[in-house]
Amino acid sequence: MNDWDMEKSLEQIGLRQETVPEAVQEEPEQLEEEQLEVPEVTEEPDEEGAEEEDSQTEVKPEEPKEQPATPAVPNKTEQKETPKTESKPETKPETKPNVTKKPSVKDDNGYIEGQTLPAKPTYIKGILVANKKYPLPSTYAPGESKEARAAFDEMAAEAKLSDINLTAFSTYRAYDYQVTLYNRYVKKDGKAAADRYSARPGYSEHQTGLAFDIGEENNQQHWASSSFGETVAGKWVAANAHRYGFILRYPKGKEDITGYMHEAWHFRYVGKGIAEEIYKQDITLEEYLGIK
């Protein structure tokens, strides 16, 4: 995206940033000695309790009045307690969806109203996501991806065979630097305009260390400009970047999906396999992940 610092970018040319029930067992012992205590032993809410009491009345019919009277009380109380415990958890999940639906409201610039930065970054299908819906923690600072840098160097080496000297003039940006950069654009063009080409702090792909702003050496007039896409170097990168794991992150005509204006210079490393699929289908990362 077009949130780059020219002076800092020029310094980056050529550099490389280093930047998870029991009563059944007791019955033979207590039938003759403690028949009055049988109702107390069979306190569990089982139907077997009733069968035990019937068997006891057949053995000694002298005390039939005491045996059927007591088990009726524990059976009633126990039956009342079980539905209470079952009904409580059923009502809780019904209120949860109502709470999570509130943050889905977006403002005029595509950001979710009242959204705060998360404690952990978001991964979808194994891909780190950073856009207007899924921000990054302010403390997330991975530095420039070594894998992405190696892929870029490989691509630049091949481009050089065609007399094209590529350079990545802006890659990883820390959260604090994005704060300074974004505020500068807001003062210059206003918040609404800045939100079209610059990410708010915490929402920038550059903070992932996987975004590379690509240009041609000694051709700074086309850096961070749509005109780069019309140059020989720009056309070469657009046609070959996917072979090295990069995708054109903000294509033309997809502004409503990505949330940003077309940026011919902004490429995102996702790996060769995924980059091939996105390139062949001519879709955005949001469309590939199903988060548009």
Image: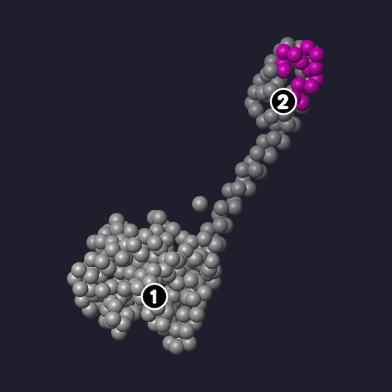
Tell me which residue sits at (74%, 31%) in the image.
73
- Quadrant location of the N terminus? bottom left
Tell me which residue sits at (44%, 75%) in the image.
199
Residue 275 % position (x, y): 30, 61
For the record, the magenta segment spans 26-41
Near-viewer residue (136 or 153): 153
Give neighbour class at mark 1: few <14, some 14-19, many 20+ (Cα, 10 Å): some
Near-viewer residue (233 or 40): 233
Residue 130 % position (x, y): 43, 66
Q: Is residue 35 visible?
A: yes
In front of the other: label 1 or label 2? 1
Residue receiving disc 1: 12
Q: In the image, is 224 to the left or to the right of 35?
A: left
Residue 42 has which mark?
A: 2
Three-letter code, disc 1: Gln
Quarter of the image for residue 85 reads: top right
Q: Is residue 212 magenta?
A: no
**First in sequence: mark 1 vs mark 2:** 1
Near-viewer residue (75 or 142): 142
Near-viewer residue (149 or 179): 149
* Residue found at the very far bottom of the displayed protein: 188
